[in-house]
Amino acid sequence: MKYILALDQGTTSTRAIVFNRSGRIVAQAQQEFRQIYPQPGWVEHSPQDIMASVMSVIAEVLVRADASARDIAALGITNQRETTIVWDKSTGEPIYNAIVWQCRRTADYCDSIPQETRDLIYSKTGLILDAYFSATKIKWILDNVQGARERAERGELLFGTVDTYILWQLTKGRSYATDYTNASRTMLFNIHTLKWDEDLLRLFSIPKSMLPAVRPSGYMFGKITGGALAGVPVCSIAGDQQAALFGQLCLEPGDVKNTYGTGCFLLMNTGDKAVRSQNGLVTTLGAGLTDHPCYVLEGSVFAGGAAVQWLRDGLKVISHAAESEAIAISVKNNGGVYVVPAFTGLGAPYWDAHARGTITGLTRGSTSGHIVRATLEAIAYQVSDLVRAMERDSGMHISRLAVDGGASANNFLMQFQSDILNCEAVRPCVFETTALGVAYLAGLYCKYWGGVDELKENSSDCRVYIPCMSEAERTQLLAGWQDAVRRARR
């Protein structure tokens, strides 16, 4: 077989990428799909739109690679993680739109949960109670879609994160499963026993019959039934951030990466130790090929690339994301302007669902260039908050940050990130490491690659950003950021 195919189903678009044995991209295809905002703070997707984009990019990438099913050794699926879909077991029809991980509709319910219960949830799942995760989204659907709870109790409904829904559709219902990484983001999975937790299912009133089987990330999940990839085995599934950690080959305790996607996600491999955070981070499970996944310490920024999309689609001060770099360097500094892109609240380390986006420091001299620059800087500031929290939790100083994701192509952002952290930021030659990670997992499982050593031979750094900012300037900028965050939280 010539290739491994990775399907990367993200928050705003779906991509299919064909990789060769050297871990290089042969061809790729991408398609954006609708973002649905029924109310302020609510975010939904149409599951039909998601599947339409999946089928479209698969067909397109095969044409671009001049390949067919017989050339593909295996498919790997990586996905936006906590996004929740509930569908009819018989027909495959969703009973409601997908509720996206960014959606805050259950924030008030989360606020009503007593501290004792929050502590129980954290002890079992490693997660801080928040509307971000899947459990309260499932509960909302069962409570608000007419007849849903009764149908769920009768075993007629299924729940899945997006990976599970895609797998179910591609196999025409023959395979109903997820992997450890996605299960660990539902707030229903015990990361210590590696099982769905009966106490949590009772707490959120969710029938166990709705939940998929849980497997290692590298696994024979089934074969595709029909279509352009008929007969191709699905040999890996991993949530996007854990896939990126694997794609960066952060396989040893202490290895750290940050992905700049719609959100930003900082992950540290902590090996067989589940680190209990005292600084607003969460503990989750990493991707692997065994029944003993590693533990991962993670911090999440809700609005990374989404803030740049806001510049494009909301303010309309740029026509495409790549413009932001040139505009940012057209002004010599931020002019005292700070943007806090808390469009759907603030994630780690604040976990403030009620914070909202703000722009502070505007004067008559402020321009759209200052706002664009401040928006890019805000991404780096949020990552800086996560890095410092992770250092406090782990007791380790982070001197090297592996970076990836679409916004890591922005050289201004990467240099500012290095400066504000005072550490190296290292971007690999293939910075679509989310897709690469799930390709690695699928290829290792089906023996397309002989082992991790072969993957390391393929790996190389494309660019290293070295900090060059003075300590005085760094301190002043960070103080301004913290002041802006305080205002957003009020």
Image (cartoon, helix red, strand yellow):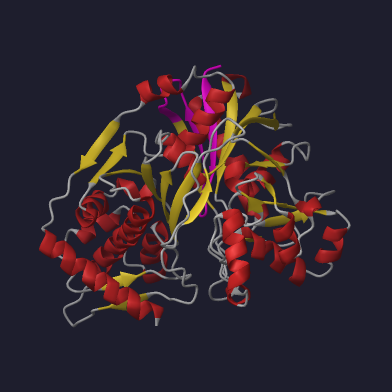
Q: Looking at the image, which residue is at 13% across and 60% down?
A: 471
Query: Where, quadrant-wise, is the N terminus in this rendering?
Result: top right
In the displayed structure, 7 sits above or below 481; it is above
Image height check: is 313 above or below 322? below
> In this orientation, which residue lies closer to the viewer: 295 or 137?
295
Q: Residue at x 74, y 50 (%)?
A: 211
In the depicted structure, whether residue 101 falls above or below residue 178: below
| Residue 450 rendering spot, x and y as whole percentages | 49, 17
Is residue 247 rendered to the left or right of residue 427?
Answer: right
User: Percent from the top left, x then y, of residue 181?
Assistant: 57, 44
Q: Which residues are magenta?
A: 1-26
Is 339 left, or right, of 221 in this rendering?
Answer: left
Residue 7 counted in the magenta span:
yes
Looking at the image, residue 490 sits to the left or right of residue 125; the answer is left
Q: How many marks?
A: 0
The question of residue 113 being in magenta is answered with no
Quadrant where the C terminus is found in the figure: bottom left
Q: From the image, give the main secondary structure of the stretch colored magenta.
A: strand
Q: Position of residue 271 (x, y in %)?
A: 46, 39
| One can see residue 161 in this view | no
Residue 307 visible in the displayed image: yes
Quarter occupied by residue 306: bottom left
Q: Residue furthest right?
A: 154
Residue 408 position within the rendered picture, expressed as x and y whole percent measured from the top left: 32, 47
